[in-house]
Amino acid sequence: MIVTVLGSGTSQGVPVIACDCEVCRSLDYRDQRLRAAIHIEIDNKSIVIDTGPDFRQQMLRERITSLDAVVFTHQHKDHTAGMDDLRSFNFKQKNDIPIYARESVMNQLKQEFAYIFVEEQFKYPGVLSVEEHVIENKPFDVQGTEFIPIEVLHHKLPVFGFRINDFTYITDANYISEEELEKVKGTEVLILDALHREEHISHFSLDEALAVIKVINPKKAYLTHISHRMGLHAEVEAELPPNVQLAHDGLKIEC
């Protein structure tokens, strides 16, 4: 399995519009962060987790030419806003794109992209066609691969992380119950939310994320959903434990 970090940034991305801080002015490519998402290649299948506003740019940058499914973590726009650009895969593959989301997320997608979900006779020609799969907090199959949901809280909003074999992806979280944490233990590679250094109402801080990583004890952990307020990539990474790195856009991880 190969995991590609499509985006490692928070909801505004990095650089932030109109910001003149040293991170936003950095020439280090690792400080250029699109909105958080990943791509998974497994058993000749191509799966994306989340389609944020930068989805088109991410697909072009990574030269991803086929897509078998999309899995959504939650309904916030920085994780869903690019869904319409899935239609390029409709045109090429000549099939509906399977999308997987909990009921509340699916309902939100139907509000924001109402024109996609209208009855077939009322659809505008060329509109995205999807195949809906409503998921719950129990294992489900995506193109032959088992996904195990990890339910976390993003302030008060339930969000799904996912475990696939010995890899786990958790974004937009500041609380994981003991029961859900048990599902993650034994993970060899973990990607975990860490917004910046200060405490935040809906995201793990750097110290909080490191504490979670210590409990899970993966062979390798990567931090994602990173704000410009975290600091320069090179400087922050120099402070981290040996098994922890900051993710960056374009990072490829073999699991």
Image (cartoon, rainbow, N blue to C red):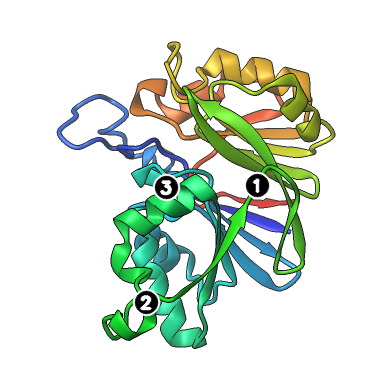
Q: Secondary structure at mark 1?
A: loop
Q: Residue at x 66, y 28 (%)?
A: 244
Q: Is residue 34 visible?
A: no
Please give left or right for residue 124 compared with residue 90 in the image: left
Q: Is residue 235 visible?
A: yes
Q: Is residue 149 above or below residue 204?
A: below
Residue count near mark 1 (Cα–Cα under 10 Å), binned few <14, some 14–19, many ≥20: some
Q: CA distance from mark 3 to mark 1?
A: 18 Å
Q: Secondary structure at mark 3?
A: helix
The part of the image, by quadrant, that contains residue 169 is top right
Q: Nearer the viewer, residue 146 or 116?
A: 116
Q: Quadrant of the N terminus?
A: bottom right
Residue count near mark 3 (Cα–Cα under 10 Å), binned few <14, some 14–19, many ≥20: many
The residue that disc 1 covers is 136
Q: Of the residues shown, which amino acid type is indicated by label 1?
A: Glu
Please give left or right for residue 202 compared with residue 114 in the image: right
Q: Secondary structure at mark 2?
A: loop
The residue that disc 3 covers is 79
Q: Residue at x 52, y 73 (%)?
A: 97
Residue 119 is labelled as: 2
The part of the image, by quadrant, that contains residue 69 is bottom right
Tell us which disc is closer to us: 3 or 1.
1
Q: Residue at x 39, y 35 (%)?
A: 10
Horizontal and vertical percent for residue 52? Answer: 39, 51
Tell us which disc is closer to us: 1 or 2.
2
Residue contact between numbered discs 3 and 2, judged by CB atoms under 8 Å:
no
Horizontal and vertical percent for residue 74? Answer: 48, 43
Q: Of the residues shown, which amino acid type is indicated by label 2?
A: Glu
Q: Is residue 87 above or below residue 156?
A: below
Label located before the other in sequence (3 or 2): 3
Q: CA distance from mark 1 to mark 2?
A: 25 Å
